[in-house]
Image (spheres, helix red, strand yellow):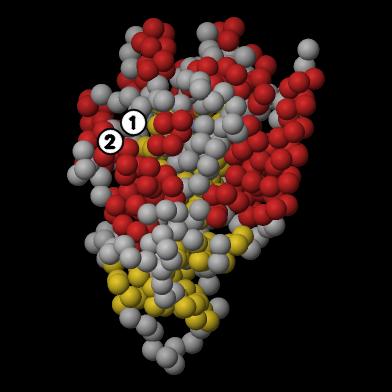
């Protein structure tokens, strides 16, 4: 089946930053076969999509999330990261497969409606008896139709051993490694057009032992999958690492073999210049989560320095308990604004911000050869944004309109050529029903928490 999108402006986000004021994109099956200026000849075959008034970009890539947090939004509103975690861990310890599915479905629907075509999830809370939480979020991603990288998270450093989380939400090292390897066996698809991959993802320096970090890296490298964790998110984390390990978070993970080209790290707000250089030298990726960092008052990551050093910096919404919006397009705008608050008006361009949401994110996930730009041969993951309405029509540059303007209406979102969104409406689920299920799951979770004496 051939699809032709034409009449739209196109920001391909390829290496040469090719753009067309008016162009066409031809899609056959799940691949792009041509991208170019003007319309295709009238006699060419295929279903035509009228892109006039729109800007086509690659589908956005979300590099960090915790889907289950969708049903714990709006809590701990004035807290720092550690205060927020301490308040939320006991609530999260009461999730189960039913609640996880409802939360994941809602979070993924929100992402999809914001132009995201590939998402990761970092799930690290596995309470005993909760059921197969990883499986239900993978099911939710299949139902919504997103390309999905499930990061099998973990925590093994409970409070009794000097960690932050209560002991009832941590697992032991052997069970974690066995469950993670089982997830790779069951789900990981290494093929270039994969809809589902697994990454190995212990949670953070203050919730995970050094042994688990080392063993996780060994497992991931033995199985050829990627590594993900949180790093250098707050000053409190830096103080924790200095006290416990006598070094910064970046130095700590470097010693454990965690600065490498198969690793991408969430946040990285507190990085000294030496750490930025080390990230560049090792080709370690970063998932920048500006809204979450602002919500928790954590600080602003040195994104311009990282990009200038050649580090792949993608974007993440982070869990919805610290970013109630959960939308990815808004993170593109936040990334630009925050970089400029830190480094002045020339710190980040609109195109660099859009690159972070697309090709840079694909680099973080090791998928830049097949995702993240609109080029012949790449997967047909494409967002078509309407830029001819009140919010955008008179902005002189469509990329600036998309990045600096209000969230643009999403005319079409394709994942592997399959439409997940048309004219702003989710095609793979009922938005009101998903919202109803999420509300019900939120209430049930809160009732469980209140029932605890
Ligand atoms: Zn996170």
Which residue is under mark 2?
341
Q: Is residue 183 left or right of residue 375?
A: right
Q: Quadrant of the N terminus?
A: bottom right
Give the residue displayed 52% in from the left and 32% down from the top: 322
| Circle 1 Cα neighbour tier, 10 Å, few/some/many (<14 / 14–19 / ≥20) | many
Give the residue displayed 71% in from the left and 35% down from the top: 442
Q: Is residue 226 left or right of residue 376?
A: right
Closer to us: 217 or 450: 450
Q: Considering the numbered disc 1 on the image, is that residue within a helix, a strand or a loop?
A: loop
Mark 2 vs 1, N-terminal side:
1
- Determine if residue 357 is in view: yes
Total numbered circles: 2
Please state the horizontal and vertical placement of residue 239, each as a whole percent of the image.
Answer: 38, 12
Please identify, in this view, whether the residue under mark 2 or under mark 1 is nearer the observer.
2
Residue 44 lies in quadrant: bottom left
- Determine if residue 33 is in view: no
Residue furthest out toward the front: 390
Please state the horizontal and vertical placement of residue 188, each as a whole percent of the image.
Answer: 57, 46
Closer to us: 39 or 63: 39
| Circle 2 Cα neighbour tier, 10 Å, few/some/many (<14 / 14–19 / ≥20) | few
Structural distance between the alpha carbons of marks 2 and 1:
9 Å
Q: Quadrant of the C terminus?
A: top right
């Amino acid at each position: 089946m051939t699809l032709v999108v034409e009449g739209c402006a196109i920001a391909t986000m390829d290496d040469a930053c090719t753009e067309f004021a008016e162009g066409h994109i031809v899609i056959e099956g799940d691949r792009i076969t041509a991208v170019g200026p003007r319309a295709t000849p009238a006699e060419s075959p295929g279903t035509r999509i009228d892109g006039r008034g729109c800007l086509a970009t690659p589908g956005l890539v979300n590099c960090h999330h915790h889907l289950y947090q969708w049903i714990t939004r709006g809590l701990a509103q004035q807290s720092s990261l550690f205060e927020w975690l301490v308040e939320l861990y006991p609530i999260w310890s009461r999730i189960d497969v039913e609640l996880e599915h409802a939360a994941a479905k809602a979070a993924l629907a929100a992402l999809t409606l914001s132009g995201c075509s590939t998402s990761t999830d970092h799930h690290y809370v596995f309470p005993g008896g909760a059921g197969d939480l990883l499986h239900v979020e993978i099911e939710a991603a299949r139902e919504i139709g997103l390309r999905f990288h499930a990061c099998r998270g973990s925590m093994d450093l409970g409070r009794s051993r000097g960690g932050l989380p209560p002991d009832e939400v941590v697992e032991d090292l052997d069970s974690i490694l066995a469950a993670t390897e089982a997830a790779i066996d069951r789900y990981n698809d290494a093929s270039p057009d994969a809809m589902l991959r697994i990454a190995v993802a212990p949670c953070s320096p203050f919730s995970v032992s050094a042994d688990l970090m080392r063993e996780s890296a060994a497992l991931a490298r033995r199985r050829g999958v990627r590594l993900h964790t949180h790093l250098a998110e707050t000053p409190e984390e830096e103080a924790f690492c200095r006290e416990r390990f006598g070094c910064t978070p970046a130095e700590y993970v470097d010693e454990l073999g965690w600065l490498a080209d198969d690793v991408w790290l969430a946040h990285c707000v507190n990085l000294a210049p030496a750490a930025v250089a080390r990230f560049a030298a090792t080709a370690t990726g970063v998932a920048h989560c500006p809204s979450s960092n602002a919500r928790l008052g954590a600080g602003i990551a040195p994104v311009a320095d990282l990009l200038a050093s050649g580090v792949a910096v993608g974007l993440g919404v982070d869990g919805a308990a610290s970013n109630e919006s959960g939308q990815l397009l808004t993170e593109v705008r936040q990334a630009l604004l925050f970089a400029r608050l830190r480094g002045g008006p020339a710190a980040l361009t609109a195109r660099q911000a859009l690159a972070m949401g697309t090709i840079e994110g694909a680099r973080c996930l090791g998928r830049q050869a097949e995702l993240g730009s609109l080029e012949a041969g790449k997967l047909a993951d494409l967002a078509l944004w309407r830029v001819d309405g009140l919010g955008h029509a008179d902005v002189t540059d469509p990329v600036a309109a998309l990045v600096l303007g209000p969230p643009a209406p999403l005319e079409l979102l394709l994942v592997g050529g399959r439409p997940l969104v048309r004219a702003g409406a989710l095609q793979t689920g009922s938005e009101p029903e998903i919202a109803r299920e999420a509300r019900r799951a939120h209430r049930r979770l809160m009732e469980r928490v209140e029932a605890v004496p």
